[in-house]
Amino acid sequence: MVVRMRANRSKTGMRRSHAAISSKHVSKCSCGANYISHRACQECGKYNGRMVIDIVARTKREQRRTKKRTTEMRASGRDTGEAKEKETTAKK
């Protein structure tokens, strides 16, 4: 069956009133960092007072990945971006 009457602006607005994007609720962690509710803290890895994310292992893994990426880029002869980093630190 086809809708016979067009929905006016009021009805359309009432229907869409619940579709608005709400802001994220941010809380303070015991370490002092802000985190989104019902999620683990990205700074210390705690959720509800328990350690759920091993932050040290994660940082080590990220360092290994960046080191591997830079060595591969050097081997292929592409720019690693280190020259730009040195220029910005030298200007400061």
Image (cartoon, grey):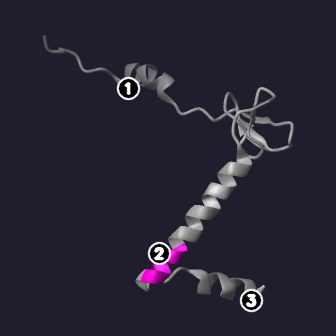
Task: Name which quarter of the figure residue 66 lies in.
Answer: bottom right
Q: Position of residue 60 (x, y in %)?
A: 67, 57
* Residue at 61% over, 58% down: 62
What residue does disc 1 label? Answer: 9
Q: Please, what secondary structure does the residue beneath circle 1 have?
A: helix
The correct choice, above or below, for 17 with respect to 58 in the image is above
Extent of the magenta region? 70-75
* Residue at 17% over, 14% down: 4
The quadrant in which the C terminus is found is bottom right
What residue does disc 3 label? Answer: 90
Q: Nearer the viewer, residue 52 or 83?
A: 52
Q: Position of residue 30 (x, y in %)?
A: 86, 36
Marks 1 and 3: in contact by CB < 8 Å?
no
Q: Nearer the viewer, mark 2 or mark 1?
A: 2
Q: Please, what secondary structure does the residue beneath circle 2 have?
A: helix
Most extreme residue toward the left is 1
Q: Position of residue 3 (x, y in %)?
A: 19, 15
| Nearer-N-terminus badge (2/1) | 1
Within-10-Å neighbours for mark 2: few <14, some 14–19, many 20+: few
Q: Nearer the viewer, mark 2 or mark 3?
A: 2
The correct choice, above or below, for 73 with respect to 64 in the image is below
| Nearer-N-terminus badge (3/1) | 1
What residue does disc 2 label? Answer: 72
Disc 3 marks a residue whose amino acid type is Ala
Direction from residue 86 to residue 29 in the image, left or right = right
